[in-house]
Amino acid sequence: MEIERHEYDVVVIGAGGAGLRAAIEARQQGKRTAIVCKSLFGKAHTVMAEGGAAAAMGNVNSDDNWMVHFRDTMRGGKFLNNWRMAELHAKEAPDRVWELEAWGALFDRTKDGKISQRNFGGHQYPRLAHVGDRTGLEMIRTLQQRVVALQQEDEKLHGDPEAYIRVFQECTVTRLLKTGDGPGDPISGAFGYWRENGRFILFDAPAVVLATGGIGKSYVVTSNSWEYTGDGHALALLAGAKLINMEFIQFHPTGMVWPPSVRGILVTESVRGDGGVLRNSEGRRFMFDYIPDVFKDQYATTEEEGDRWYNDQANNRRPPELLPRDEVARAINSEVKAGRGSPQGGVYLDVSTRLPAAEITRRLPSMHHQFKELADVDITKEPMQVGPTCHYIMGGVEVDADSAAASVPGLFAAGEVSGGMHGSNRLGGNSLSDLLVFGRRAGAGASAYVDGLKARPVVSEESVATARAEAMAPLERDGENPYEVHHELQRTMNELVGIIRKAEEITQALEAVEKLKERAKGVGAIGGRIYNPGWHLALDLRNMLLVSECVARAALKREESRGGHTRDDFPGMSPEWRRKLLVCGASADGSSVTVEEKVQPGMRDDLIKLFDRAELKKYITDEELAAFDALVKE
Amino acid sequence: MGYKAKFRVWRGEGGEGRLEDFTVEVNEGEVVLDIIHRLQATQAPDLAVRWNCKAGKCGSCSMEINGKPRLGCMTRMSTFAEDETITVTPMRTFPVIKDLVTDVSFNYQKAREIPSFTPPAGVQPGEYRMQQIDVERSQEFRKCIECFMCNNVCHVIRDHEENKPAFAGPRFLMRIAELDMHPYDVVDRKDSAQEDHGLGYCNITKCCTEVCPEHIKITDNALIPMKERVVDRKYDPLVWLGDKIFKRSRSTKG
Amino acid sequence: MTQTAADSPAPARRQRAQLKERTLRTDQWWRYPLVTFIIFTAFLVYATWAIFDNDFFVAPYHAPFASPCLAEAVCPEEAQLFGWAPLGDWYTWPPGLLILGLPAGFRFTCYYYRKAYYRAFWLSPPACAVNEPHSKYTGESRFPLILQNIHRYFFYAAIVIGLILAYDAVKALIEKPAGVGTWVLIVNAILINMYTLSCHSCRHITAGRLNHFSKHPIRYRAWGFVSKLNAKHQELALISMFSVMGADLYVRLVAKGVISFPFA
C-alpha cells in the first residue's frame, strides 16, 4: 500500500501562534515549508488566549523596558527559568508585536494612537498588548492572514500559491522519522495521517519544528481543547530528545466550575486586572491572607490600598488578587478545602459590585458572553463561581535558547511544547509573546540548519513501516473503548498529580499509569478510517500516557514546592533544588521513561546584577549569594 | 435532573446518508455538543464531529440543530423541551465528509482570493499610529471566529451551488469591508468587491447576521456600508463629478 | 514535488448531505414573511386608494400622501407650498401622482424594505435556512435589481419631502395649535424624519465613507447619532409607515366630514 509523500525543507507541526510564526519565518527565509495541524487552519488553541501579549513597549508607562520585563519573568518563574530565553523574550517581544501590526493586526489603542497595554498578574507595569479579551484570536487570525499573504505572493511569482508554504489541515503526525535509531541520528521526516480520510502521509524533511502546545487533556478539569494531548512532547521523546521541567504545570486559578460540561473553561485574568475580586462563601477577600513572604513588599495589605491601586498605580501596591497564578490557584484550593467554597466547589469572583454594568460589557465582552451563554449567569449582576483548572505546562522539549534546537539534529521546538522559558511558573501574557519570539527563532533556526546541511537525510523505510503498523494497530484490534482508558487517565492525573501533590499519591499514579499503558495496548477502534474519532483518540493515548508518566516521575523526584509544583510533604522552596533541572527521556519504543537531574547553568553576570541582593537571597544558595556579592564589588 | 432525550443525527459519508435515531441521557447544564460526545463515548464511537474549544471561541462545531445553523457548544439543552426530538445535521452548503463534518475548503479558497492587508510603503513596524475610533469598525469584524455559518446560511450559495465561483460569501465580503475601513490599508477594494467577489449578489436578507454567534452586525455594519462605498465609486454621478472637479484621486480614502 | 498515490480507502465523494426536506426548522419561521406580506399589501392597497381620493386638504391640514401639492388646477391655494404651483391648468390628475414616487422610491429601495419584501414577496429566501423556490439567482448584481443602488438619490429627495411634511405640521400648529390633526401631523413628521435620518445611505454620507473618523470629529459625532437611529431602522420604517398612513387617513376623514368634533 502506498503512502502520500511530500518533500519539504521545514515541516512545522502545529498551527498555533508558535507554529505559524515559525512557518512564516522559514518561508521568508526561502524554505519550502509545510504546516501540519490537527484542526482546521485558524482554530488552534491560541484563539483561547484572552489577556494579551506581554511586551515592554512602554506605551502606557514609559518606565517599562526589557530589563523590568526580564525581572518579572524570572521572579514569576521562581528563578528556575532558562535566563537566556527570558532575556531574548523580554528583548524581542516588542518587535514581534509591532510586526503583527504591520501584518494587519488591530490592537486596542492609547490616546496618542499607540498600542494600548494592560495590567496583568506579576507584571510590574501595564504591559499586555491586547484587543478586548480576544487577543489570541487576533493573533492567530493575523498570522493566518500573513500566511495567506505569502501564498498570494508565491502565486504571483510562481503561479502556485502553495509553492513555498502549504497548510496540511486536519492532519496528525504520529511519528518523527530519522535516519537511524540513535539519539544523535538526525531527523529526516515525519509520518502521519489525514483525519479526514485516514490516509497516511509522509513528509521527507530535514528539519521539523514542534509547535504542538500542551498536555492538558491528561487532566479532567482543563482549559485545554482535545488537541492538547502532548503530541509534540511525546514525538520528541520518542525521537530521542529530552523534556525538562515536566513537573511544573500551571493551574489557572479561575476556570469555570459550573455547568459540568464547561468545567475548566477559562475566566480571563483581566477580570481581576480590571477590578474583579475573589471572595469566599463568608464574603471575605481571602487573598489578603495568602500573600507569601517573597511578595510581601509588592502587594497591598489592606482592601483600601488595593482598591486605590486601580486608579493610582504609582502610589499604591497592587491587590493580592493579582499575585502570580500559582499563588492564587493554591489559595483558592485551600479555601475550598477548608469548607469556605461556593456551592459548586469554587470561590466567588465578583466584578458586578466593582464596575458599572456598561463598563463590564465594554471591557470584558467575551466573558460576559461566555457566562451568559454557557452558564446563564449575568456577570454584571452576580458573581461568577471559579476554581483552578489545568492550563499550561511550563515543561517541554529542552532547547537551545537562541535557535530553539533540541538535542536531536534537525528537531526544533517553540511555544508551550518547549521548556525552560517560564521556569516553574508562567506569567499571564508571557505565553503569546513567547510564541512569537521563539516561533520566529525556531523558524530561523530550522532554516539555518537546513542551509548548513551537506546532504538531505534520508528516511529509513523500516521506520516508515513501523510507524504505519503502529498507526493501523487500533483499527485491527477489537479491544477496549479508548474513551474509557482516557477518562481513567484523566481522573488519575487530576486526583493524584494535581495542584497539591504527595509522594504516596504520585506513586499510586505511576502504578495506575503503568496499568493504563498495558490497557492502551489493547484498545480498539470500531469503524473505518474516515474521520474516526475513536481511532484518533486511540493513537493519542500513547502520547498522553508517555507525557503523564514524565510529569509524575518528575513530580515525585522534586522534593520541594515551587511555582506550578506543590508538594504537601515538602512545602518549602529550596535554594538547592533551584539549581537543578529534571530531565526526562524515553526509550525509542516509549516503554521506559527516566528522569535525571541536571545542573541549571548560572545567570550571566550582567543579568544577575539586575536584581537586588535582598530579593536574590530568598531564592539562591549562600554559595551563590557569596558569588553575587563578589561580582557586585568588582 | 437527568432525562433521556431523543436525537436524530445525520450520519453518512460523501453526501449519502440518513437521519439516525438515538435516545441519550442529558444532564443539567449540558449543551448539544456534550450530547454528541456522549453518543460518541457510549453508542457510536465513530460518529464524526468537528470541535475544539467548547467555549464558542474557535468556531469549529458549526452544525444545524433543528434546521438552524448553530454552534453545538453554545446551544444549551435547556432551550429544548424534554420531549422534543432534536435533529442535528451537517452544514448544508458545504460537501459532507462524514456525519457532521463538512468540507469547508470553499472558505479557505475564498480567503486566498482577497488581496491581503497592504500598508503604505515606508511605514516601519512600531510607527503605526491609529486612534481607537478609527479601528473600532474593523475590530468588530475581526471578532469573527470563522465558524462559516454565515456562508452556510446565505441563500446565494446555499440554494445555488452555481454561484459559488462568483460569490465570496458574507464572511469574506466582511473581510473586504474590514480592510477597506482599515486606516492603513492602501488597496482600493470597491470595484473588486462588486466585480470579483459578488457583493451585488447580496440581497441583504440578513440571515448572516441572524446566525452569527459573535453577534457581529454583518449586514448593517459591513455589507451595506460596503455597498454604499461601491455606490460612491460606481453609481454616484455626484461623487464622480466631485472627483473630476476637485481632481480627487479615486483611491483616496477619507 | 508531491506524488500522491492511491491509498486503500477510496476518497470520499464531494457532495452535500442529501436531505430532502426544504428545511428542518421546527419553529414558526413562516410567520415573519406572512405578517410582512399582509402589512405591506395593506399599505399598498391603502396608498392606491389614497392617490385617487381628492379629499386631501382641509385647512390647515394637508394629507401627507398629497403633499406638496404642485398643480394649480387641483390644489386649493392654501394647500400650495408658499403658493408655488409650477404645473398649470392642464394638469388635472390627482396631485399625489406627481410626488408619491419619491417617498415610494425611497422606501422601495430602502435596505430594510428590500430585506422584508425579498423575503415576504419573492421568497428569496422566505426565512433563514429555508430553501428558496427559484432555480436561478443573481440578486442585485445585474439589471433590474442593480438599480437598487440609486437609493441614495431617493434619500436626498426624502429629505426634501420630510422637510415639507414638517412645514405642513408647523403651519398647522400656527393656525390650529389645539387641533388633533395638528398633533397627528407633528408626530408623523417627526417619525418620517427620524426614519429618513436613520437610513443606511445617510449613515454612509455623514461619515461612514471615511476611514479616519478622528480627523473629522463633527462628522464622526453625526455618524454616531445616525448609527444609533440606524440600529432602529426597521422599527422606524414600520412605525413611520403606520403613522403616515394614519395621518393621511385622518386628514381625509376630517376633509370628508366623517370626523367632525370641535378639536378635530
Image (spheres, grey):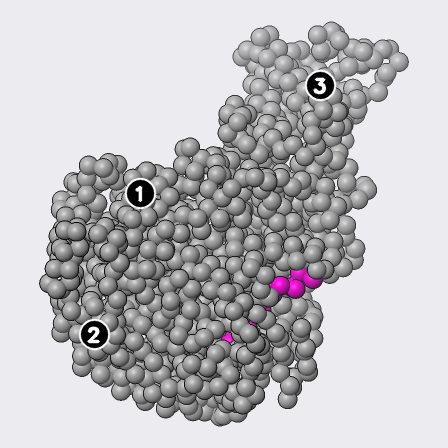
Q: Position of residue A186 (x, y in %)?
A: 48, 79
Total count of labels: 3
Q: CA distance from mark 1 to mark 2?
A: 35 Å
Q: Nearer the viewer, residue B84 or A401?
A: A401
Disc ID at residue A558: 2
Q: Quadrant of residue A224?
A: bottom left
Q: Position of residue A105 (x, y in %)?
A: 50, 47
Give the magenta range: A160-175
Local secondary structure at mark 1 = loop
The chain identifier of the residue carrying mark 3 reads C
Which residue is at 79% across, 44% downward?
A: C142
Q: Please, is residue A438 above or below residue A312 in the view?
A: below
Q: Nearer the viewer, residue A458 or A373?
A: A458
Q: Image check: A9 left or right of A14?
A: right
Residue receiving disc 1: A64
Query: Would you say the magenta stretch is mainly helix, strand or loop?
Result: strand
Asked whether residue B32 appears in the rendered view, the answer is no
Q: Image check: C182 left or right of A625?
A: right
Q: Quadrant of residue A160?
A: bottom right
Disc ID at residue A370: none
Q: Are marks 1 and 3 in contact (CB under 8 Å)?
A: no
In the image, residue A410 lies in the stretch drawn in magenta: no
